[in-house]
Image: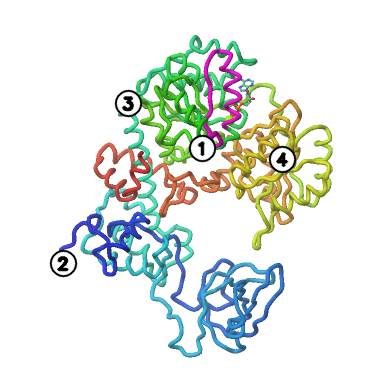
Amino acid sequence: MQVPSLSKLEVTALKGVGNKFAQTLARLDIQSVQDLLFHLPQRYVDRTRIRSIASLRLNDVAMLQASVLDARIVFGRRRSLQVKVEDDSGVMSLRFFHFNAAQKNSFEQGRVLRLFGEVRPGPAGPEMYHPEYEFFDTPENAQETEARLTPIYPLTEGVSQPRMRALTQQAIEFLAQSPPEELLPDMDNHRFRVHSLAEALAYVHFPPADADIQQLLAGQHPYQQRLAFEELLAHFLVKQFIRAENRRFDAPTVTLNRNAIQPLLDQLPFSPTAAQERVTAEVARDLNASKPMLRMVQGDVGSGKTLVAAMAAYATVQAGYQVAVVAPTEILAEQHLQNFRRWFEPLGLKVEWLVGRLTAKQKREVLERLHQRETDIVIGTHALFEEPVRFRCLALAVIDEQHRFGVHQRLSLRGKNDDDSVPHQLVMTATPIPRTLAMTSYAELDFSIIDELPPGRKPVQTVVISQDRKVAVIERVRAAIAEGRQVYWVCPLIEESETLSAANAEDTFETLSTALPETGVALVHGRLKAQEKEERMAAFKQGEARLLVATTVIEVGVDVPNASVMIIENPERLGLAQLHQLRGRVGRGSEESHCILLYGDKLSREGKARLQILRETNDGFQIAERDLEMRGPGEFLGTRQAGDMLYRIADHQRDAHLFSAVQECGLRLLDAHPEAAQKLVDRWFGRRQHYALA
Ligand code: ADP
Ligand code: MG
């Protein structure tokens, strides 16, 4: 049979795929047989052999054959059915939270089961929660063992794992006749000791029974690394395409120099730091060119990023254009609104805001004034990205705390002007981006760093102490509040957890409300509705609540200068960079500020040493570097980037060692084989490309 290129072969060519199922697969971005081959397993399970109970370790996913010893209902925090089973090597407990009487009765003593599940920590030793099981009364009845490791795929509703496996199996059969094109230069293929892409794909979908499953689960197999390299390369290339694309547009030219912004400087109660001046000069060079700026300004919390944005904004308005400032939450937008009004209204500029909470009529009016150019500067949330927003002449978009927004959202600001001009973009973040990440995930941007804090800051005094001393800490909170201060109390979890022992915000809120009856206490966490969250934050900001119990949702940008104490429970569960961000919520006023890290009782010596880094320094960049050394970039960033960091097989932390080779290979391809670069992007992004690019 003559097989066309697999990228041209529709999935409907496979047995059992009709038009309807093809539509379901399209939701996974699978349209061609090639798409199916690049839809890679997330992990594997081993159904090739029956393990002995004694050989199991925590988190193993394994098949067992064992006989029932005993089944009983246990009344713990939640009622559950506990079944004890044994094989020749030992005893193991199964736990079911959902069960009925018939099911309980079926576990008769001595009956033989074949089981499949994950080993997890239980109250009295390892357990399997809700394993798959089948009685093995007659051998025909039992689940068969498999000849190869079983891949587990990302799915969507209407596709099951067995069905996906069957499809992939068919797709693999095409590989020999129509292998996917090798797009990496030879030397890069050899780096991974891989003969061909076809071989790597076949292996990664269905590894043989004797494959090293631990290596595969860790993503360290050379075939996986070969594919991860190619995927990272495709992401790097997309960013380079965004850069190239950006240079095709024209942007308004704005002159930013001391002359242009003198009236603003005269107004300020302070003068810019040397670092603010230097970064502003870098921004000025971009604004003065006729191509759109794409620049990220990194600066520690409190380094004064807003002023840099304000200087750029002022010059832009003086040049006759409009400015938009986008913040991730209404609270932050409101903060910017206050600052910008205070600085700009005396100079005759018109500053407005556009957020979800405005009425429809108010919004219409704001939109109208924007389009008529009656408004110089508009501050808002993601509402500014939306369709009805039009400008007469937007020349500068400032995006604060960019990691809350995706590339496609930012780029949607293009095409909002009446003419064809595209605004300059200034992206600001307090999360230092490690150099390795900057080279790939943010390769479309230029970088500036504000590496100096304004003078006269009192560093936050940090102590690291055990949760055993919580009672004393509560007394300290009482004293601070009695002196008129406000306090943050941060917990890693929202509610009590079955598997994790860590402070949770709901219980802590109860405890503190009871212990401090004279104090207004507020609770915020990520599961509240946005409006509820905003209201409670606002109550704290206005001083109605004196103590704010929160999860890490308060991390970004909230500015309450009167808050001078921050308590963080179980800090060992958070990254240092994240802790530093949290700590940056205090130390904003004239008072001496304190941060108390209340670690749990199981913290190791190294764990304590790690937290001591925060005691030793208030320098976010130094902390980020040390954190990165210890944990790698994936965890370091904590959150996934909205939309544009969804990898199929690569992993930022695990594969950081590939970044410089990716960058080098990417630049080589763009230079010598641009058509291969485009094909790589097509292969890995397919239809998502539009999303990534526009
Ligand atoms: P961030 O970089 O965290 O966004 P902000 O822009 O909110 O920091 O600035 C933090 C505080 O420092 C604000 O109150 C701001 O007015 C003040 N500030 C900014 N620049 C200077 C400066 N050069 N000298 C003194 N204070 C400054
Ligand atoms: Mg800020």
For marks 1 and 3, the one nearer the N-term is 3
Of 121 and 616, nearer the camera is: 121
Q: Amino acid at mark 2?
A: Met
Question: Circle 4 is placed at which residue position?
Answer: 488
Q: What residue is shown with label 2?
A: 1
Pick whichever of labels 3 and 4 is earlier in the sequence: 3
CA distance separating discs 3 and 2: 51 Å
For marks 2 and 1, give the CA distance: 51 Å
Among numbered discs 3 and 2, the one appearing first in the sequence: 2
Q: Residue at x 63, y 43 (%)?
A: 533
Task: Kindly identify which residue carries mark 1.
Answer: 433
Q: Quadrant of residue 219?
A: bottom left
Classify mark 3: residues with Cα within 10 Å, few (<14), some (14-19) or many (20+): few
Residue 353 magenta: yes
Q: What is the distance, in whole Å, between disc 3 and disc 4 at their CAs?
A: 47 Å
Q: Nearer the viewer, mark 3 or mark 4?
A: 3
Left or right of residue 435, residue 392 in this image: left
**Disc assigned to residue 420:** 3
